[in-house]
Amino acid sequence: MEIILKQDVQKLGFKDDVVTVKPGYGRNFLIPQGMAVLATPSAKKVLAENLRQRAHKEAKLIADANAVADALKALEIKIAVKAGGEKLFGSVTNADIAAALESNGQSIDKKFITSGTIKRLGKYAANVRLHRDVIVELPYEVVAAE
């Protein structure tokens, strides 16, 4: 079953993508939740026209995302957490990285950060998706709080 996504769906696709899914998933979840519409020939034509008209706006968004990516690469992020030896009391998650970026002047939602759960001190890297075409690797360090 082919559908057109109306919003980003994690592990499936981005907004305005035409994807193939199993009929039950499309009919019982994606379409009723308002995340997708059925990909009929007329809907595909409308989508193609909208994408063509939006192409120049997309170029500006990509340029802005690249500017933010350059700013992120210049940052040195240190996240201070309580630790006993090398192990942390708790863990460092995407929310902690988003808070550290916020304190450095970059407002990025935690759902666009992919790092996993960190439970030890050391240097790590997280992937930050600024745009569907712009993904930047953000190095950060987890240090013991004083």
Image: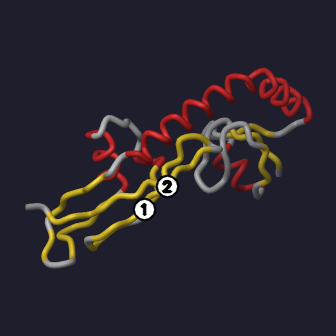
Amino acid at circle 2: Glu
Label number found at residue 125 = 1
Question: Is residue 138 rendered to the left or right of residue 47?
Answer: left
Question: Is residue 125 rendered to the left or right of residue 30?
Answer: left
Badge 2 element: strand
Residue 120 against residue 82 in the figure, above or below: below
Which quarter of the figure has residue 38?
top right
Badge 1 element: strand
> Disc 2 vs disc 1: Cβ atoms closer than 8 Å?
yes
Question: Is residue 140 rendered to the left or right of residue 12?
Answer: left
Residue 126 x %, y %: 44, 58
Q: Nearer the N terminus, badge 2 or badge 1?
A: 1
**Dividing the image into 4 quarters, which one contains the C terminus?**
bottom left
Count residues near mark 1 (Cα–Cα under 10 Å), then give few for <14, some for 14-19, many for 20+.
Answer: some
Count residues near mark 2 (Cα–Cα under 10 Å), then give few for <14, some for 14-19, many for 20+.
Answer: some
Residue 89 x %, y %: 17, 70
- 32 or 55, nearer to the observer: 55
Residue at point 84%, 24% (across, down): 49
Question: Is residue 14 rendered to the left or right of residue 20?
Answer: left
Residue for badge 2: 137
Amino acid at circle 1: Ala
Query: Among all residues in the image, which is located at the extreme front?
Result: 74
Residue at point 52%, 50% (across, down): 136
Residue at point 65%, 44% (across, down): 133
- 128 or 34, nearer to the observer: 128
Residue 48 x %, y %: 84, 30
Q: How many marks?
A: 2
Residue 125 against residue 75 in the figure, above or below: below
Marks 2/1: CA distance? Answer: 6 Å
